[in-house]
Structures are given as C-alpha cells and as structure tokens.
Image (cartoon, rainbow, N blue to C red):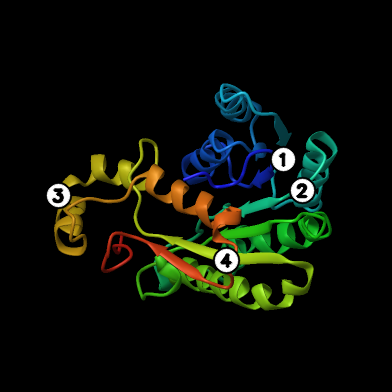
Amino acid sequence: MNLGLDGKVALVTGSTRGIGRHTALTLAKEGCDVAICGRTKETLDDAANALKQTGRRVSTTQVDLVEAGGVERFVDDAVKTLGRLDVVVANVGGTFGGNFLQTSAADWVKTFEVNLVHAVRVIQAAAPHLAKSDSASVVIVASISGSRPGPRAQYGVAKAGEIQLASSLARELAPQRIRVNAVSPGSILWEGGSWHKRSTTMPEVINEFVAREFPWGRMGTLDEIANVISFVSSPRASWVNGANIVVDGAQGQPSIKLP
C-alpha cells in the first residue's frame, strides 16, 4: 500500500534509538524527509547516517528536550531546514523512580515532564506549522501501561495522560485539520532495550512473564510498532482521529514488578 507520505516532512522525538529511530527510518523509506533529535552527537550522527541511506533529507538537532526551549528549538530547526511540517511523532518517554513506596514526588514530576509534558510542548510548537499542511498528523507514542494497571504507577499515569491528550486535542485541533492519535505499544524486545537487558539479567523471570502474558509466546518488534505509527501518520488514515491504537499482540499485564 502506498501510504501517500512521499514528499512529506516528519519530526520524531526520541529518535536516536528504539521505537523513535525505527519509526523515523520507516517514515523515510515511505518518502518522508525527517527531523530527528538526540542528546549526544555520536548517537545523533549514527541515526542521521542511517536515514540518509534512504536518499531523503535529514535535519538533526542536538538537544535535551526536557530543557527549557529545547522542544521549540527542535521544531524551529526542522522547519528552517526542511521547509514545512506534516507529521509529528511524540515518542520521548521513560520513567524515574521505582515501585510506589520508593518513588519520590520529584520522580513523579520528572516522569510526567519526559512523557506527557514533552508531548504537550512539541504539539504546541508544531501546531502553527502543521496547520499549513493538507495532511497534518500527530501521533503520541503512549503505552498499554496507560490503560492497564501495573508496576511503576508514575509511568502508567503519565501514559494515561498522553492517551487523554490525544483524545482531547483531536477535537480541539480539528478546525485546523490536524489529526491527533495515540499508539500504545506493548512490551517490545530489541537489542539494547530494557526488555532485552532484563532478558539477559533475569532470563527465568522474563521467560515466565512471556509464557504467562503473551498468547503468541513472544514480545513485539520495532517493525510492528513503526509500521502502525507510519500508517496512522499517513493520509491513508485520514479518518482516524482521537484514537488510542493498541499494538501488543493481545498482551496481558503490561509489566513486571522489579526489586
């Protein structure tokens, strides 16, 4: 299927590793010019070199998006370099602290900043540019933790906020013809990711988790998430708005309680 993304410009946060990097690469293969960001020059250059192999234009910004003005500079750099903005993927995420009784209020604030608040800031900064597009789309990468109970409550509550944000902004930004959706991945296994690290340090625990919670007997892949994000971002999904699209292979519990 031709997704109709050829010649579009996409901006992806958290784009030097994992889901963000793979999504940027998938969008580039579909014909998008892509803006990426990262905190370190080495990882940013590595991701940019992979993207350039597709033949598409690439804009890079070395920045910590949590810092004041970081998100806004990233958006400005992308538009100055690539000339427009059609797609935004708000992918940055993570968690601070541990189990509830060991997690401080500051950990909750930091977790909200890197997930929900980052998404708010990038959408606000991008909205004036997206409003000029004939196929504007925002995808917020949430998590199944945002709709199911599990350990690390601070992460789940922040992701629930992202899902609600997508639903609310889908209506509020509709007059500007900007679609907003959430994609909620389940547990994804990729080399260097948290589940890969746990599978090497506690293989018995992870094997039991997979056997119990995954009907297909495995975790998801980066391809399986990036493909859905790319479709939802595209004009082919023009009537998908305000949705939370779960991509988890019918996974049960979203996570495990760690020591």
User: From the viewer's perspective, is the residue at label 2 or at label 4 nearer?
Assistant: 4
Residue that appears at 64% across and 78% down:
168
**Could you tell whether 63 is left or right of 153 in the image?**
right
Earlier-in-chain disc, 4 versus 1: 1
Q: Residue under circle 1?
A: 63
Residue 38 visible in the picture: no
Q: Residue at x 72, y 33 (%)?
A: 59
The earlier-in-sequence mark between 2 and 3 is 2
**Mark 4 or 1, which is nearer the eye?**
4
Q: Which numbered tag is attached to residue 204?
A: 3
Seen in the picture, residue 151 relative to 172 is either above or below; the reply is above
Q: Gap in Å between the C-alphas at discs 3 and 4?
A: 36 Å
Number of the front mark, 3 or 4? 4
Residue 122, given in percent of the width and then of the height, sits at 72, 57
Q: Amino acid at mark 1?
A: Val
Q: Nearer the viewer, mark 2 or mark 3?
A: 2
Mark 1–mark 2 CB contact (< 8 Å): yes
> Callout 1 environment at 10 Å: few (<14), some (14 to 19), or many (20+)?
some
Instruction: Give the mark, 2 or 4, whose residue is nearer the N terminus.
Output: 2
Mark 3 Cα-neighbour bin, 10 Å: few <14, some 14–19, many ≥20: few
Look at mark 2 in the image and give the residue it sits on.
Answer: 70
**Tag on residue 181?**
4
Q: Is residue 96 left or right of residue 45?
A: left
* Distance of label 2 from label 3 (alpha carbons): 41 Å
User: Between disc 3 and disc 1, whose residue precedes?
Assistant: 1
Q: Position of residue 119 (x, y in %)?
A: 65, 61
Q: Amino acid at mark 3?
A: Glu
Q: Position of residue 37 (x, y in %)?
A: 67, 39
| Percent position of residue 74, x then y | 76, 44
Residue name at image x 32 percent, y 41 percent:
197
Q: Circle 2: is it few (<14), some (14-19), or many (20+) Cα within 10 Å? A: some
- How far is mark 1 from mark 2, CA to CA? 6 Å
